[in-house]
Amino acid sequence: MIKKILLSILCLSFFQSLTKLNAQVLEDYSQKWDVGERESWFGTSDLVSQEVDLTAFPLSYLYLEIPEETVVFAGDKLWFYAEKDTVWSRQLIGIKEELKANEINLTLYKEGIGTQDVKFKKVLDPKKVSFDSQETTGAFKIREDKRGDFRDFFVVSIIIILVLIALYKQAYPYIFRGLSKPSGLLSDDDFSEIGSLQKFFSLDILSFVFIVNLMTALVGVLGFAIFRPDLFLRLFPEGFKYLLMVWLVVSFGLLVLTIFKFLAIRTFAYMFDLGKVEFPHFFYLLRLIIWGSMLFLAIAFMFLMNSFFQLENVLELTFRGFFWMYLGGIGVLFIMMMNKLSFKKYHLFTYLCIAELVPFLILAKWVMVLGQ
């Protein structure tokens, strides 16, 4: 009796497995696309392509999920145009007869298209393949819909920042060199000159801080628009001028927050009886932010203009690099203060934890949660 029950279960499992074979994916081509090479500094070829064998499994089907406004070529022949998001499937034997070829070079043209945008499989029965929604992630939506506006905004913002830097360098050359020199990241000279720069609320210093905030705000707006465009588009209207307005508003907001941060550092320095250490402390980390933002924007510019579909992954790695660079900067700051100032180590460590480390980690955690 038990043997009969087991035999029945095995037979039932066998027939169920045969049924599931109807939806079997013979080969998944989705990650095998060759992406079009760069054409210029300010454009991409916007195509993906690959060779497809039409002789293997001739009774199977090619299954494509194509985003809207995509032109599909078979070799040099214009095959069809997908005006809207489309699920397309054809049996290989029919394609082979139509094109009179044993293999084809399938090419898809669309502005900003990438390997993640096209699902491409060889299947036994396309009706039993679960349809993957063509809703793109936030970064891809911006790429597909408003990539031109986004590029224009980024380039105009960079030009504005460079013009302001040039004007500031002409107006205040000594302050500009002192506050932006990269050698200051590895030098403790600032701690030997405490008191030489104590007019924080003067026009020259606030102007420099505002230029730095323009760079930081551009990094923030870029990251927000790439990683959370769903939320970005709900909060702000679309278009070039609105991106520019958001950037300027965020810059002024960061200027206010920077002023409060300086006041907080001054307060903590007074509470710990560290003298006027807030000036070299603040401007050392400001210098770190300057060079970190410049590196970030240079990388973003390169990929924004050439490989937009890779921008999200690159920015994720860049943000992580900036996180560890800032933590490293706090560590170097601690060593400089420990070697140059006559204060106890635990005194300095507690001061930096309260003034820098804890607020930065809280901010980083908030940004990580927002990005998810």
Image (cartoon, helix red, strand yellow):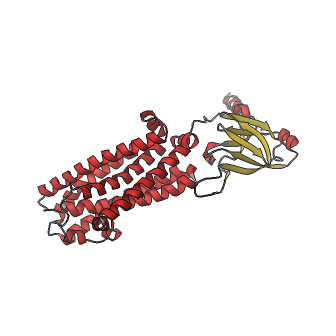
> Residue at position x 24%, y 50% from top?
259
Q: Is residue 364 left or right of residue 310?
A: left
Residue 272: x, y in percent?
A: 13, 58
| Residue nearest the observer in this picture, 369 or 113 | 113
Q: Is residue 98 left or right of residue 372?
A: right
Q: Tell me: residue 97, above or below residue 321.
A: above
Residue 211: x, y in percent?
A: 34, 55
Q: Is residue 121 left or right of residue 273?
A: right
Q: Tell me: residue 210, above or below residue 149.
A: below
Q: Quadrant of the N terminus?
A: top right
Q: Is residue 74 left or right of residue 69?
A: right
| Residue nearest the observer in this picture, 312 or 7 | 312
Residue 325: x, y in percent?
A: 37, 61
Quadrant in the rendering for residue 235 = top left
> Residue at position x 48%, y 47% from top?
153
Residue 54 seen in the current view: yes
Residue 283: x, y in percent?
A: 26, 61
| Residue nearest the observer in this picture, 22 or 185 | 185
Q: Quadrant of the C terminus?
A: top left
Residue 372 seen in the current view: no
> Residue at position x 21%, y 57% from top?
200
